[in-house]
Amino acid sequence: MLNFLLKVDDLVWGVPLIVLIISCGVWLTYRIRLLQVFHLGKALRLMLKNEEGGHGEVTSFGALCTALSATIGTGNIVGVASAICAGGPGALFWMEVAAFFGMATKYAEGLLAIKYREIDKSSGHALGGPFYYIEKGMGRNWKWLANCFAAFGVLAGLMGIGTITQINGITTAAQNFFDPDARHIVTTIGSGDSAVTITVTTVVVGLLVTVCAALVIIGGIRRIASVSQVVVPFMAVIYVICGVLILLFNIPAIPGALYEIFVGAFAPKAIAGGIVGISIRTAIQKGVARGIFSNEAGLGSAPIAAAAAQTKDSVRQGLVTMTGTFIDTIVICTMTGLSIVITGAWRPELGLEGAQVTMYAFQKALPFPNQVCSFLLMLCLVFFAYTTILGWDYYSERCLEYLTKGNMGPVKVYRWLYIAAVFVGPYLTVKAVWTIADIFNGLMALPNIVALLALSGVVAKETAAYFEEKRYVEHLK
């Protein structure tokens, strides 16, 4: 089964999809005139300033935190480590390239989400995202494509990026900290290479996270947003502080790490020492795939949260949505990747995988006892993954709501299926989990990228009109 999944993953995340996603980001960057460079400062200021008088369910900052709760997750710790282990240090370079152009993609997603969303005036309930800007922007003849996106979104949340991957990362981190030698075994599932050892730590932590997730998920978007507005800034600040300390205490090693990353992007074997399987294609494929898994630019998930924002201006929300990719990848993933390259934690001879790679890097790079480093990383990963579980439940519920034409009965049933998936997640193998998540990510991206390319003219027109009006108002002042 794993071999089959790997073949499907290679097919989905082949050269055509990677070229399509990057090309979309490049094209949008051209259409909006490098907006992610010239207006990043404005976007960061708007991020902290809620708009008054807009329609929607949550504040603009709350919508961003909901989106960040889904993007800042195991991809920032486990995903970066997996990309570098598979594709060498050069994978981080391609992750950054994808993120730079992904900022333009994310901007377009946020803009279109507000422009084409639907709001129930009586209840204030907002629903929007790729399914609506495909149907309303491209026309009713493309509704089948909107349905495809929504279906893939439901499956991605339930079987991949939203549940199994996140809870697996949490229990693995807890296991490595509390019982690294697996002395307290409950049972073993499977045999051979696919065997999964179930420990007391895995059972207890998995159950606790499942209960905590259920208590929030049942409350809907407002409860998810309220929790995210507290947890997301807190966890991001802790991780950034750790990342800054790593860089400060290892300043002499940074130039060498940057050299490895840049050379590894174009000549991976020169850095990897001839390690079998590492090529330019692998570096690009893993870097782009894991980067998109982390920041979700192009997947079409973030605009579902953006559509709930209390705002009247689509461009404004596009700018706010764009900051998610900057924070997630340009800041957080870069810090993770540099720490891994600086310490050489990615090298195969160490025999590490997933969260173990980043934990090794923290232990080597920070001047604290190993237990303290392990605890800090475990704490960050637990918070990151927990909020991702919450965010992706919201995404997949909205996709299902679109498919059922607003019938909330199936949505309520889905919530319990989602919670059940979180419950069983710790007992699945890591490699199979990540492969399934990659497949559904790619399937979600296809219809969304098609829509973004088709509606790029709308994005360019709205953007030009917004900044022309701003210049006119400033001229009058």
Image (spheres, rainbow, N blue to C red):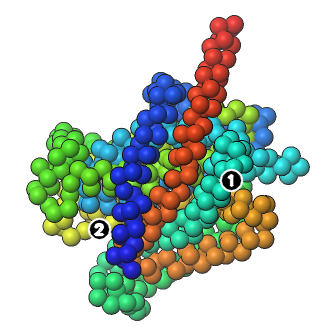
Q: How far apart are marks 1 and 2 (CA)?
A: 41 Å
Residue drawn at (67%, 17%) of the image:
469
Q: Which mark is residue 427?
A: none
Residue count near mark 1 (Cα–Cα under 10 Å), binned few <14, some 14–19, many ≥20:
some
Residue count near mark 2 (Cα–Cα under 10 Å), binned few <14, some 14–19, many ≥20:
some
Q: Which mark is residue 143?
A: 1
Q: Quadrant of the N terminus?
A: bottom left
Judged from this view, the residue extending furthest toward the front is: 141
Judged from this view, the residue extending furthest toward the top is: 476
Give the image location of residue 125, x and y in percent. 79, 52
Where 252 sits versus 227, above or below?
A: above
Where 291 sits versus 350, above or below?
A: above
Q: Nearer the viewer, residue 200 or 80?
A: 80
Amino acid type at circle 2 is Glu
Q: Which of 152 and 48 is in front in this view?
A: 152
Residue drawn at (46%, 34%) of the image:
27
Q: Residue 353 carries which label?
A: 2
